[in-house]
Image (cartoon, helix red, strand yellow):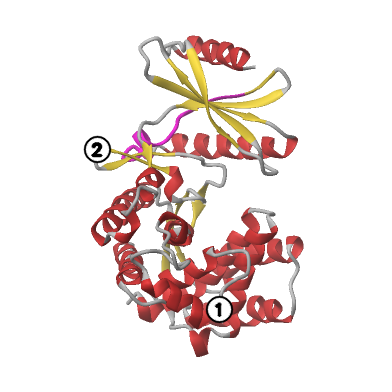
Amino acid sequence: MIRAVQDMANAVATSLGLPLVTSATVIGIDYDCAAKVTLLMFGDDGKARFVAKLARRAESERALVAEYNALVKLWSAGPRTVSAELPRPLALEDVAGRRVLLSTAVSGTPLTVGYYAPGHVRRPKRVAQDFALAGTWLYRFQRATRSGTTTIGPAAFNEWIRPTMARYRAEIGWTSWESRLFSERLPALCGALSGTDVPVVAVHGDYAPGNVLVSNGQVSGVIDWELGRSAGLPFSDLFKFAVSYSSYLDRASPSGYGTPAGHPGWALARDRWGAIPGWTNGTGVLYALFGSGWFPDLVRSFLHLHLRRLAISPVAARLFLPVFLAEQALVLEDPAYRGGYRALLRLLYEQGEARLPRLDEVVA
């Protein structure tokens, strides 16, 4: 199969006048419902040239098509200031009965390599550097792909929030608290924010540390665009990086007491707001957004700086954080992941005013 994909890649390369590849290695295999195999392909000089993603199941074909279409739209729009960091889509073809997405390779090492290095996430300076790198590139990307402005109000609610509500209800369903959240609380917040301007930008959709590649002290590539879209609001990628970075602190910096070394506030957040059984990510999210200590201060500074750069009122975070959590509950069908984000959403709704600081206050 690898040989067949290599032949397909060289046929595409020949038609586009690109260098041929002579070898390939498997760099990733997924096992969930969107399972795929990822091949990195090299030229005879040993340099990485192409990436090929193969669908292992019918369900994963949709993800490959979505990623191909997202990249085609981004390259067609021409965000020249960030195009060097984007894989260039080359082909989407069937090879030996499997759908294959072929793109150029981008250089760099995933940010998670440093993240999981011993002691990395317990050192404020190194963590701050990670946030600065990711935030700087994200701002450049959003500025380069900005296509207009939406003003919060009924029309913006129907365009940018209601589709998430409808999908959430169709795929997950909702109980009385979710009905009140989506039908009463969010429309009320939208009304209170009426007139607030928000830029319309391209969205990666999964701007997590594992998808951010770094080289020589800067972001050199951003990969995995299956959730990408050419027009959206900037909150998803902003929240996604902060939440993803925070979710795995207990695994990146374990101690003998079941809490992340260097993060005493993590345990305080767990004790204050409760743990989500089977999903420790939730404690990391609550710690980062609402907890105390150097890390939550850094995360909130990151959010504040980014919103200020985009000239967005921090009050808008109150409306779009629950929307983001609802979006995340829809990303994977894994019960622990989906249930975890649903539990966070419920906590934000039912106990937010009494037990959680307002996000616009902690990032202001």
C-beta proximity under 8 Å, tags 2 and 1: no
Q: Which residues are magenta?
A: 79-92
Identified by mark 2, the residue type is Asn
Q: Examine the structure image and report whether residue 341 is included in the region drawn in magenta.
A: no
In the image, residue 308 above or below residue 231:
below
User: Along the polypeptide, which appears first: circle 2 or circle 1?
Assistant: 2
Q: Residue at x 62, y 13 (%)?
A: 4
- Residue 306, how many percent across, how many down? 33, 62
In the image, residue 90 above or below residue 57:
above
Task: Decide: few, some or many residues near mark 1? Use Cα within 10 Å; few <14, some 14-19, many ≥20.
Answer: some
Q: CA distance from mark 2 to mark 1?
A: 40 Å
SS for callout 2: loop
SS for callout 1: loop
Q: Which mark is residue 216?
A: 2
With 86 as the anchor, is 331 left or right in this view?
right
Q: In this rendered view, identify the residue nearer to me: 227 or 166.
A: 227
Which image quarter: residue 289? bottom left
Q: Quarter holding the C terminus? A: bottom left
- Residue receiving disc 1: 274
* Number of marks present in the image shown: 2
- Residue 175, how many percent across, how many down? 75, 77
Identified by mark 1, the residue type is Gly
- Residue 74, how many percent across, how many down? 46, 39
Q: Examine the structure image and report whether residue 86 is included in the region drawn in magenta.
A: yes
- Furthest toward the front, the residue is 256
Which image quarter: residue 99? top right
Q: Quarter holding the N terminus? A: top right
Q: Is residue 196 visible?
A: no
Q: In this rendered view, identify the residue nearer to me: 314 or 95.
A: 95
Q: Residue at x 59, y 80 (%)?
A: 349
Q: Is residue 296 visible?
A: yes
